[in-house]
Every structure is written in structure tokens, then in C-alpha cells.
Image (spheres, rainbow, N blue to C red):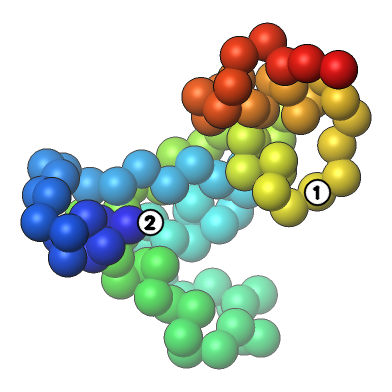
Amino acid sequence: MHNLMHELGILLPGASSLLIDNQSVISVAKTLEHHGRMKQLDLCYYWLQNVVQEQAITPSFVPTTQQAADLLTKPLTTPKVREFCQMLGLGGSGGS
């Protein structure tokens, strides 16, 4: 997103926040040590680790129940859809 905004001539100060509901991923992203259980990961997945070390992205924990990105990736109940829409600033109280 930072790159897109830069291309549009909008400079954003600081790192982009990445809200993740998996504490293991956050730990791996923040530490450079090799984890034996990560042997199956291809080298391209170390991109996140690099951008975190460069301080371009700051990963933070968010509980699964508050992961608004699920709105776009999972089937949800109507109340959860409305809650996530509000969190994302999409519409008001919702209709129908």
C-alpha cells in the first residue's frame, strides 16, 4: 500500500501496520533466527521478515474475533458482517 500511495504522490510517514491473528507468524517475522519447523517454507516467504527488519511494516496481534479482513475471506454471519463493515468504515448501521 505504501508503494501504491507513493506512486500516487502521497507520502505516508512511518511503517504500515499489519494486523495478524497468528502470534507464531509475528514471532517469526520479528526474529532472524532459523526455526527448524519452518523447513517447508520457500525463500520467498522470508519477504515479510525482511520488510519488518527494514521497519517498513509493523506486525501487531489482533484477536481472531476482531480480524476485519475476514469480511473478505470467510463466510460470516450477518451480525459479524455488520460489525466488520463498521470497523472498516463501510456504511452505517446496515439495512435489510
Which residue does the numbered mark 1 point to in the structure image?
74
Query: Based on the displayed image, in which of its 4 quarters is residue 56 positioned?
Result: bottom left
Which residue does the numbered mark 2 point to in the structure image?
30
Where residue 38 appears, x then y in whole percent? Answer: 61, 77
Residue under the point 43% across and 47% down: 18
Task: State which quarter of the image contains the C terminus.
Answer: top right
Judge depth for marks 2 and 1 and give the one in front: 1
In front: 23, or 1?
1
Q: Is residue 51 left or right of residue 49?
A: left
Specify which label sits upstream in the sequence, 2 or 1: 2
Where residue 8 appears, x then y in whole percent? Answer: 17, 59
Q: Is residue 24 left or right of residue 56?
A: right
Task: State which quarter of the image contains the N terminus.
Answer: bottom left
Disc 1 marks a residue whose amino acid type is: Lys
Residue under the point 66% across and 86% down: 40
Could you say which disc has been placed on residue 95 in the image?
Answer: none
Where residue 19 appears, x then y in whole percent? Answer: 49, 42
Disc 2 marks a residue whose amino acid type is: Lys
